[in-house]
Structure formats: structure tokens, C-alpha cells
Image: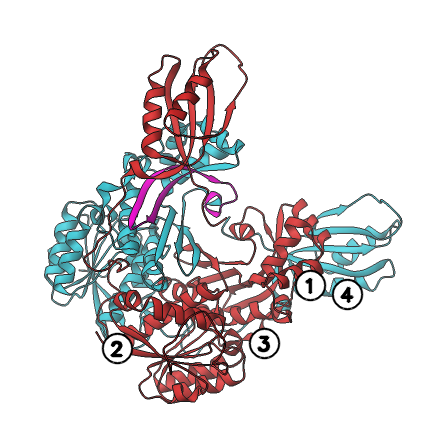
Chain colours: A cyan, B red
């Protein structure tokens, strides 16, 4: 297996996440990639603080140029942020013929055209999946999955701070200043929140997306930007009255060969999927001439979600560098090789249940049913029985706590064989899961 | 630019979509791919019917083997479906060393292990993005975007027919049989709907996803399957009473090295994003150890959405075959080269507006404001004025029809300078857009 050496610049929040995956999951990621991906060095001005991940001696160094100029390093990951030293480092890495990965939307928005041009001249790749939407693979989706589409429009919630604040205004009727303070206390907003709440960060991301989607230059300065600071509880309440939610949206549309590109608080119908994206989450709808609308949703920030996007770029570039033929193996290497996982028999699963019994309307029915459920260790969460309207079967509905499928099946078979039961019971499983 | 020749087997609904993109957008797709992608031949037993796309003479032929055995053809796209002749064709294509693309989940569920093994032996790729979730790039996302994650669980709405029917049951209180009939009339269900409504198609897809996500074999026979035919309006109503929606879900979870894999009607909280996925649309939530939850949403079937997924596979394989270095160009080639699109000035956009005026509570205020809006060609859709509670400013809210930003700005400047106006008007743009 060919080895690819990675050098990381910036050992902050996201950097530490990248290090964690590259060290703890090196075998998994390398086996999926078909390339041995090795973290050779990490540079940060702070080489003392504990980030909760132990690096071998000598890996963490203070001088970025020791990495950028190391001829053995193939891929440079820039996670410093900002427009200062990060730009210098990236341009030097390109000049040295390295592949470059960055999550730096501010830099791309300001200097992306220059950086892309220099990379093209040098024949190296710049990858920046983590610069927009955190773990949502929006760059890969636009570029690869939608390669057969003309992009017609994009509509996104791309800033978790603003969405957190607007959600709080909506759900709790907070005033803007209070919601901002709460966001700062919870770590969803910076001490200086200007870039986020004024819509600038969102516009940085839209500038990057527009280039990928429509082939514009990076046109940050031409994007209309309006933040969320003027939104009042009164406007939120009016919006609700009309069936709308207010979200800070990045909107772009191709119209007659020109691109509308704007960032502003927007009222959208409450039935729109984006209206249901709450808290610090991100989402984006892309409209293409073939796909109609697709939507991606996920965490737009945070250590591990953003690191996941960086790793996806690392693997893509490592595979290109190593000249790997074919695609990532069809079968995941999540399990050790040769140790294929198998499917758990349905009888062994645990979940919650809705059960509707069709029983005669007689005294003692409920106690009979619940007795049998109890015998099978099925704990009832609630019972719902409608008053009788007319002679005939009465639906008795029970919601259970978590129970084992095999137990539920046995209990139901027993209950359904009672002569007080009129027709087979209806069982529907309940999942209270994710993505709320 | 290297040329890659594509041969298509099956000129049905999706096949026609693929042909449309490969012919009408050949230049766009090829320029993005960096490879000249040429549709050399299409085989179908029906070479007479009009599919609305004109093929050059000799391209459409009746004998698939003329394509499979053509040494000039690099990529075979199988869009015949079913488990019969499609399997023969795919195995022969692999034996001939072709790269293969298929949308055939039934075939992969039944014979995927065999097909993947043979392809690996021969060193060719099998691509099947279109086999699950239509245009949602779920395979690419699992394999590439989430390459740095251990997959913990997947929860998906993967069958548009079932989701259409359940949506109808929920929104209209229809009985199952009526909703099915309606789905058939509207083309969302087949004449024989068994594969869909019994959950089998969903399980085919889950079997494919499990292999990609966890490294199981294709274990279709071990997946628990329960369809939607027994769901009654009464259960839908009870679900709503408890704050749930009923969806046919494909669910898998890794638990202690085993995989839960099941397809059944499921109650999910109405606040869950999947609960808001209605009609014939598909969506899937994937939970990974780094990303937490991400969600993809889009059309799971249909000519162009499915063709879009096929084209994404064509481009991926064409790039591998041609040994293209680097990734798809950073800047889209949506526009002709050298003809970069620019951003439309904000003044020129058209949208709908919410405007809140803070005015003195005097007679004539409304007529004054609406007069100025009229002067600027802004048409009012509705006016909302709360009764006065106390002395002081009264919010007057107006929703406009579509208007031009420049006109709205001019009108507001004029209105805000009136002495009946107490503080600056609040303007929020309204988008009634997509993804509802």
C-alpha cells in the first residue's frame, strides 16, 4: 500500500478532530482509501496545551515552514483560519507542489480566485469541503453527484450561530440580545459575533458555492448581505401568523445568465423543510435541471463534523496522489478484514411499540391484556381507550417502553388467541430517533 | 481530451433520461469531467418507439451483445432491471473487462456478492449510485464523504410509492386501497405494486446500503420486512394524537458488532425531519461517529433524477479510466469557457416582501403609505393592522406581490421620511420556494 504523508497546520478545535481520526482510525481510513495515510507533522504556535490527543514525540512543532518545505509531505491541511498567515502558508505549499486542503472560507472568499489560479498553474488540487456546511458534503455533491446537472438555484442555512439565535427567538420569544448572549454562553457564538450575525460568514460560503455551482469567479463583494440583528420578536410573531418562519438564508439563482446572490433574513413557509432546520444545524437545498431539488442537512460546525469533511478531502487527494485505480472499495472496511458482520435476528431487537387491540367491550379486558404483557416483561407506557360509542369492538391502544421483539410477538400471539379479542392486534414500532 | 465510450442497455424511462443528458449536455458534462464522454450505442428490444430524443442512425440496436462485446466500449450502463437477462449482461460485461453501472437494486440484493466478487477479480468497478434513493447521492456520501466515520445507523424513506400512499392516508384520511389506486393512476405505483407496498424494494436498497456502510455481505434474506398494507386510517389518527407520523422506514443500526436491519411502518415524532418528507420523495439520515447525523433528501425515482445519479457514476468511472489527475475542476464549466457569469445587482432582483411600518395612529396613514407603494409599482397582497391598544405607534404590516428591490427601496425611503412614520420600516424578503 502506498503511503501518503499529511502535514497539518493549526492544532485548534478542528485540527484536534482531524488528528484524532488520522491517529485513532488510521487503519480504518487507510484500508478504505487503499492508501496508507500517515500524519507526519502538526504545526501550531502553541505546542504545550493538552488537546486530549497524544501525539508521538516530535510530531507537534512550532514552525509551519518545517512542514510546508518538507519534501516528504504530500498533503498540507490548513486549519489556522483567517486571512493572514494562512494565505502565505497555502501559497507556499502550492509553490512547493503540495496538494492543499483548507476549511478557510474567509480566505477563499477574499483570495480564492488567486489561489485557484496558482494551484491550476502548478497542477495541484485545492480541496475545501470543510469550508462550507461542516460535515454536509455540499462541495462533493455539487461537483460530483450533480455533474450531470445545470444548477438552477441554491438556498441554504449556512451559519449555525444565526440559526441558533433565530430558533431561540422563534421558540422562546427571546429578544435578539438575550438570544445572542445565550448563544455566546453555550459556545455557539464567538465573543465578537460580527462575522456570524451580520451574515458575512454566510456570504463567504455562498461565494465559494457560487463558483462551484455556476462557474462565477469568487464574487464575495457582489453578494448582498444583511444580518439578523434587526429581527424583533414582533416580526417573528407576524411571520408565524402568516405561516412563515424567519431564517437567515444564502440564496442564489441563475436568471438569464446572471446570478442572484444574496444573504438576508427570509420568511419561508413553515412547511418548507428548511423551516424545520433548527438550532445550530445547517441545511441546503440545491435545484438542478435533472434532479429537481435535493437537500443536505447536518452539523455545520464543531470539531468532529468538520474534521469528517477534512478527512474526506484527505482521502480523495491521497487516492489521486497514489494513482489508485478504481473507486473506494464497494464493501466498507468498517470491520476487520475477513470478519464480516451479520444481521441481528429480528427477535433480538429492542424498540418501543404501539399496539392496538380490537377487543370486546367487557369488564376485565384491560387487566387480562396488561397481565399477559406483564408476564412477558413488556412494560406499558400509556393506555388509550376511547369511550364506547356503539356496540362492537373497542380499540385499546397501548404504547410500550422499550421491549424485546420476541417477547412482544409471544405476548401478542397469546393475547390474540383470547376469545375477548375480535381481530388480530395491530403492532407498529416506534423510533424516537435522530434528526429532530 | 481522452474519449471514453459508453454503451447503454435499456432504453426505458431512466435510459431515455441518461441518453438525453449524454447527448444534449455532452459538452458540459465532458468539460466538467475532463474526459470526452461519448454515447456509442444503445440496446433495447424495442427500437421503434419514440422516446422524445433523437439518436443518430445506427446508435439504437436490438442486440445487447453487440455492445457488451464491442472492444471500443469502456463503460456499460445496465438499465434493464429485474434479475433475468440483466445479470447475464452484467457478468458478461465484467468478464469482458468493462466498467459497469447499474441501477438494479433487485439484482444487487439477490446477486450482489457474486457480482462484486467477480468484478474485484477482474479489476473492474461496479457503480450503482442510482440503485438507492434516485438522485440523492447516498452511496457517494457513505463511501467518500463519510470515509472518516464509523457508521452507527441509517434511517431512510427509500420508496416513493409507499411514502406517497402514507402521505395520502395522513393528509386526507384515505383508506389504503383508495390511496393505492390513486397512486397507480398518478403513475407513482405499478400495476402490480407488491414489490413496493410490501417493503421489498425498500429492503433491496437497505441490503445495498448495509454492505457499503458496515461491510456486511449483501444480506437481503436476513432483513426483516413488513409492508404498509395493514395500516388503517385509525392507526394514522392515533399516531397523530400521540404526536407521531407513520412512515415506511428502512432502519439499520450497529449494535455490539451485529447489524439490526429492518423495514417496517414506523411511528416517528412529528418534529423529526423525516416526518416532514412527504409525497413520493425520499430521504435518509445517516449517523456517523464523527458527523453525528446528516440527512439527504430528494426524488428517489423518475427519469431525470435517476439519470442524474447514473451520469455521476459515468463521470466517476470515465475519469478513472482516463487516468485523469486531480479532481473535477474547482470552477464549474456551467458557462462556456471564458464567459464567466456575474452577479446580478441586488436592485434588479424580484421577490415578495413583508414590510412593517411603525406609524402614528391617525386617519389617512394607510392611504398615504399604500399610495406611495402604488406610485412605485408595488402591489400589496394583504394588509394587517392590529387594533390600537394604547397610545403610540401601531405596527402596520403589508405583504407584497412580487416587486423589484430597487422600487421597494425607493418607496421605503420616501415613506420613512414622512412625519407620520415613527421609526424606520422593517423589510423582510419572502421566498415561497422549493423543498416543501
The CA distance from mark 2 to mark 4 is 63 Å
**Residue bearing the label numbered 4:** A413
Pointer 3 with pointer 2, Cβ within 8 A: no
Q: Nearer the viewer, mark 3 or mark 1?
A: 1
**Residue bearing the label numbered 2:** B3
Could you tell me which chain the residue with mark 1 belongs to? B
From this view, report whether residue B359 is shown above or below residue B377: above
Pointer 2 with pointer 4, Cβ within 8 A: no
Please tell me which residue is depicted at 87% across the width and 52% down the height of the picture. Answer: A392
Upstream in sequence: badge 3 or badge 1: 3
Asked which secondary structure carries label 2, the reply is strand
Indicate left or right for A360 with B213 as reference: right
Asked which secondary structure carries label 4, the reply is helix
To which quarter of the image does residue B346 belong?
A: top left
Pointer 3 with pointer 4, Cβ within 8 A: no
Please tell me which residue is depicted at 54% across the width and 84% down the height of the picture. Answer: B84
Upstream in sequence: badge 3 or badge 2: 2
The 10 Å Cα crowd at callout 3, few under 14, some 14 to 19, many 20 or more, is few
Could you tell me which chain the residue with mark 2 belongs to? B
Q: Which residues are magenta?
A: A247-275
From this view, report whether residue A367 is shown above or below residue B71: above
**Residue bearing the label numbered 3:** B221
The CA distance from mark 3 to mark 1 is 21 Å
The CA distance from mark 1 to mark 4 is 20 Å
Asked which secondary structure carries label 3, the reply is helix
Same chain under badges 3 and 1? The reply is: yes
Upstream in sequence: badge 2 or badge 1: 2
Q: Which numbered marker is on residue A284? A: none
From this view, report whether residue B61 is shown above or below residue A33: below
**Residue bearing the label numbered 1:** B229
Amino acid at each position: 500500500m502506498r503511503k501518503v504523508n499529511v502535514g497539518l497546520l493549526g492544532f485548534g478545535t478542528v485540527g484536534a478532530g482531524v488528528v484524532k481520526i488520522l491517529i485513532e482510525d488510521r487503519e480504518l481510513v487507510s484500508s478504505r482509501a487503499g492508501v496508507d495515510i500517515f500524519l507526519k507533522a502538526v504545526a501550531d504556535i502553541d505546542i504545550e496545551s493538552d488537546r486530549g490527543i497524544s501525539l508521538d514525540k516530535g510530531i507537534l512543532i512550532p514552525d509551519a515552514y518545517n512542514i510546508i518545505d518538507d519534501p516528504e509531505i504530500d498533503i498540507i491541511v490548513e486549519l489556522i483560519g483567517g486571512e493572514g498567515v494562512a494565505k502565505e502558508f497555502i501559497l507556499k505549499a502550492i509553490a512547493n507542489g503540495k496538494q492543499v486542503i483548507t476549511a478557510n472560507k474567509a480566505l477563499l472568499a477574499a483570495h480564492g480566485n488567486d489561489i485557484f489560479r496558482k494551484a491550476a498553474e502548478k497542477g495541484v488540487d485545492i480541496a475545501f469541503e470543510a469550508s462550507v456546511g461542516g460535515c454536509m458534503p455540499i462541495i462533493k455533491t455539487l461537483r460530483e453527484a450533480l455533474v450531470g446537472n445545470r444548477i438552477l438555484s441554491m438556498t441554504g442555512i449556512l451559519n449555525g450561530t444565526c440559526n441558533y439565535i433565530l430558533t431561540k427567538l422563534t421558540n422562546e420569544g427571546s429578544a435578539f440580545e438575550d438570544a445572542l448572549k445565550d448563544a455566546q454562553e453555550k459556545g455557539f457564538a464567538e465573543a465578537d459575533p460580527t462575522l456570524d450575525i451580520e451574515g458575512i460568514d454566510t456570504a463567504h460560503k455562498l461565494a465559494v458555492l457560487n463558483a462551484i455551482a455556476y462557474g462565477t469567479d469568487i464574487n464575495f463583494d457582489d453578494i448582498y448581505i444583511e444580518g439578523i440583528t434587526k429581527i424583533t420578536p414582533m416580526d417573528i410573531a407576524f411571520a408565524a401568523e402568516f405561516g412563515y418562519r424567519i431564517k437567515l438564508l444564502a440564496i442564489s439563482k441563475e436568471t438569464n445568465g446572471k446570478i442572484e446572490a444574496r444573504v438576508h433574513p427570509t420568511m419561508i413557509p413553515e412547511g418548507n423543510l428548511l423551516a424545520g432546520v433548527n438550532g445550530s444545524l445547517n441545511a441546503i437545498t440545491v435545484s438542478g435541471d435533472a434532479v429537481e431539488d435535493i437537500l443536505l442537512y447536518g452539523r455545520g460546525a464543531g470539531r468532529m463534523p468538520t474534521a469528517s469533511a477534512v478527512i474526506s478531502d484527505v482521502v480523495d487527494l491521497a487516492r489521486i496522489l497514489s494513482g489508485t485505480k478504481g473507486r473506494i472499495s464497494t464493501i466498507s472496511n468498517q470491520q476487520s478484514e475477513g470478519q464480516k458482520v451479520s444481521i441481528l435476528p429480528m427477535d433480538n431487537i429492542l424498540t418501543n411499540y404501539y399496539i392496538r387491540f380490537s377487543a370486546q367491550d367487557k369488564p376485565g379486558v384491560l387487566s387480562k391484556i396488561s397481565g399477559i404483557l406483564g408476564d412477558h416483561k413488556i412494560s406499558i407506557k400509556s393506555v388509550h381507550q376511547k369511550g364506547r360509542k356503539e356496540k362492537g369492538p373497542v380499540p385499546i391502544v397501548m404504547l410500550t417502553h422499550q421491549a424485546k421483539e420476541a417477547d412482544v410477538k409471544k405476548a401478542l400471539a397469546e393475547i390474540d388467541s383470547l376469545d375477548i379479542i375480535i381481530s388480530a392486534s395491530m403492532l407498529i414500532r416506534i423510533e424516537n430517533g435522530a434528526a429532530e
